[in-house]
Image (spheres, rainbow, N blue to C red):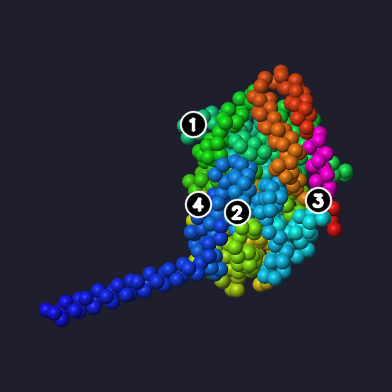
Amino acid sequence: MLMKKIAKIISIIVTLCILLSGCSKKINKNRNITKITMFSEDANRDDDGFQNPVAKEITEKTGISLDIQYPTINVIQQIKILVAGKEYPDLIFAKGANLDTFINAGAMRDLTPLINKYAPNLKKLYKGKWNTMQYSEKNKAIYALDSVAVDDKQLQPSMGFELQNAVVRELGYPKMRTVKDFENALIKYKRKHPSIDGKPTIALSLLTSDWYWDITLGNGATFALGEPDDGNWYVDPKTYKVEYKFARSNEKQYYKWLNHMNNMGLLDPDSFVQKPDEYISKIASGRVLGLIDAKWDYCKGEDILRTEGKFERTYGMYPVQLTKHTKAADFKSVKYSGSWGIGISTSCKDPAKVIKFLDWMASDEGQILRNWGVKGKNYNIVNGKRKLTDKDKNDMVNDNDYKRRTGIGAYLYPFPRWGSCKKDSTGQYYSTTNKQSIIDSYSSIEKEVLKGYGVKMWKDLYPSSRKFKVSPWGKAFMLGFPSDSASADKLNKCEKIAKEELIEMVLNSPDNFDKDWNNFVKKLKANGVEQVNKKFTKILRNRMKLDNR
């Protein structure tokens, strides 16, 4: 009996030792992992807390786990709170004026010595681009690594007038050149189909909640006038003089058309009150015939339609213009200019480790993992070439949760990376996206619609980059005023006026539109828009001097 008790005790002790040994190994392993904190001013719906397979593989390769914090309130307010507290995450991703705010607060570290000592992959990636990332002609510090993909090539439209494939297919692929063509298609289809799946058909819906008004309400005008996307600015291509675009008479005619669309009952009455989730949900219902939006802004709703097999309710993108005298400038090339980016804060305790992590992200290994996923799971090597599994190839297109579930593509922007069509040292593309992969991703209905228009890709409907001169200033919206400057205060007032007044003008009687527009322009002038124009012109021209050294 005694021997049995002793044997039982020994067995328990051995079991406990094994368990404790296992726990010890787990603890030791966790101790080798460094958690890097990061603030990103842009939300990432595909980040699951850095727990997906790609994130775990990044941690396995680097010993780094990212704790990324996103804005929970207004971005500018959140940045002000961070600056006031003077305690910053290890990494900061900020854009334009917001990046300036961090820099002026002493929150950002000059990366130059760290790059020179620890970052061969970053040196290779940004070769020939370093001047564009220097803060100014006087202050040559590099506070942030540019978030724009290097040597990127646009393969798909980014902005457009969108129509459901069901609409153009039923109408026999009508020409889609002007807003009148777009309007007529909406009228004809809605008249035939007043409801879809038992709910009222919506001809056109917009999203103007928070900063989204810049896209569907603001950029719609820019696009329809054949101008490049410079945000809320217009840059004279000859003089580089900048104007706040909403004060220009050119834009007036576009908003007059929107006013007409509302008066015709074709504009969703929720356009100026709905939140992003409501907008996406409405698109996913399949009853919104038309949009005027950027692909990235509505694609989540379209992904749900794909997942549910409602391919006829997904959208084609069309280069619709206000008149036939302009052409959509969506594919207009711009000069590379670094004004948004990711940098290391002055609160970071181990900047060498953090820059090494960013350097690994820029390596071939890091970029292939972020683009392709885990070898043997998401892709295999076939005849010396990377090939996605059939499941991944399908899910990448048709599963709206794919990025979040796998992590593939979830950590490209805003981290350092090569653009589409750039090849690695083996002659293979870093990105999974190329012309053929895009064509392969189209549903049979999309291919049918494209064939109806005599093209193979949506980009083929748009004027090519060869039709335009390169914008030597880059993208004006990537620049900005320091948020604590007098010019920024004036601009904020103008932005508030523009959003409120444009919405009111679109909703008011067409009889009052001209009078409303004149009062709107007077308000902008009274609140300093002309001074803002002069100041921003100076900022843009100075930036061009820096980039052209």
Query: Which element carries disc 2, helix, strand or loop?
Result: loop
Q: Mark 4 sits on what residue?
A: 401
Q: Mark 1 sits on what residue?
A: 199
**Image coordinates for residue 440, horizontal then vertical, percent:** 60, 56
- Residue 380 falls inside the magenta stretch: no
Query: Which element carries disc 4, helix, strand or loop?
Result: loop
Number of the front mark, 2 or 3: 2
Q: Residue furthest front?
A: 85
Determine the CA span between mark 4 and mark 1: 26 Å
**Image coordinates for residue 290, horizontal then vertical, percent:** 61, 36
Determine the CA span between mark 3 and mark 1: 51 Å
Number of the front mark, 4 or 1: 4
Q: Nearer the viewer, residue 275 or 487?
A: 487
User: Would you say the magenta stretch is mainly helix, strand or loop?
Assistant: helix
**Image coordinates for residue 501, horizontal then vertical, percent:** 69, 27
Query: Which element carries disc 1, helix, strand or loop?
Result: strand
Would you say residue 460 is visible in this rendering?
no
Lower position in the chain sequence, tag 4 or tag 1 = 1
Lower position in the chain sequence, tag 3 or tag 1 = 1
Q: Quadrant of residue 530?
A: top right
Q: Amino acid under label 3?
A: Arg
Lower position in the chain sequence, tag 2 or tag 4 = 2
Lower position in the chain sequence, tag 1 or tag 2 = 2
Q: Which residues are magenta?
A: 530-543
Q: Amino acid under label 2?
A: Tyr
Q: Nearer the viewer, residue 257 or 540?
A: 540
**Image coordinates for residue 122, horizontal then vertical, percent:** 69, 66
Lower position in the chain sequence, tag 4 or tag 3 = 4
Determine the CA span between mark 4 and mark 3: 40 Å
